[in-house]
Image (cartoon, helix red, strand yellow):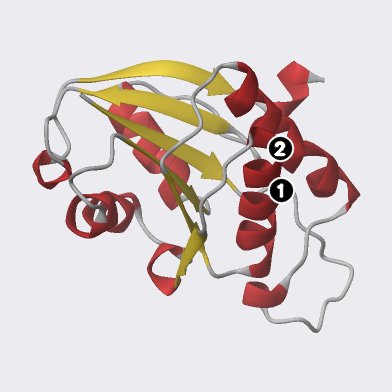
Amino acid sequence: MKNLMLLRHAKSSWKEGDLPDHDRPLNKRGIKTAPLMGHLIRDHEIVPELIVSSTAVRARTTAQAAAAASGYSGEITLTDELYLATAGEILRFARERTDETLGSILLVGHNPGIEDLVNMLAGRREPFPTAALAVFELDIERWGELELGIPSKLRNLWRPREQE
C-alpha cells in the first residue's frame, strides 16, 4: 500500500501584472490557507515521508507553509516537472521518480493537471480549489506500478473553505 497526497497551490496574487506566471506569490488568503492544510496533515497524523513541489513561487511557498505546519522535518524537493504538469505527467513523475522505499509522498502542483488527476484517481468529479488537499490510498506495493486504473481509495479531501 502506498499513499499519494496531492495539494494544489494556495491562492496566488495577480497584483503585479508584469510578473511572469512562474513568479507570482501567494495573496493574503493563500498565506492563511496553506498552513491550514498542513495542520490537517499533522492532526490526522499523515505527515508524508517526502514533499515534492513545483518550482513556481506560489507552489513552493504553499509547500513550505504546509510542511512547517504539519511538522514535516525533511527537505522539500523542487522540480520544474510539476510546473503546469498534466495529470499524466504528474502520475509519471510519481511513478518514475519516487524512491520505492517511501510509503507516502505529497506532490504540490497546479490546475488543471492536479485536479484532473484527483478526478481520475477518485473515479468521479471532485472540485479542487486552491489549497485543496486529497489523500489517496493506492493498492500498489511499488511506485513503479502507479498508473491510471489501479485500485485507489480517496481517504480524505479537504477544501480550505470547508475547514475555516
Nearer-the-camera pick, 49 or 66:
49
Q: Secondary structure at mark 1?
A: helix
Disc 1: CA contacts within 10 A as few (<14), some (14-19) or many (>=20): many
Quarter that holds the C terminus: top right
Q: CA distance from mark 1 to mark 2?
A: 6 Å
Residue 62 placement (x, y as % from top left): 67, 51
**Amino acid identity at mark 1:** Ala
Identify the residue at image location x=69%, y=44%: 68
**Amino acid identity at mark 2:** Ala
Nearer-the-camera pick, 20 or 107:
107
Residue 39 placement (x, y as % from top left): 70, 28
Above or below — where is 14 with respect to 141? Answer: below
92 left or right of 73 in image: left
In the rendering, which numbered label is found on residue 127? none
Quarter that holds the N terminus: top left
In the rendered image, which residue does mark 2 sit on? Answer: 69
Residue 145 placement (x, y as % from top left): 9, 40
Above or below — where is 135 with respect to 82? Answer: above
Above or below — where is 148 with respect to 51? Answer: above
Identify the residue at image location x=25%, y=53%: 98
Discs 1, 2 touching: Cβ within 8 Å: yes
Identify the residue at image location x=27%, y=51%: 94
In the rendered image, which residue does mark 1 sit on? Answer: 65
Q: Secondary structure at mark 2?
A: helix
Q: How many marks?
A: 2
Nearer-the-camera pick, 50 or 8:
50
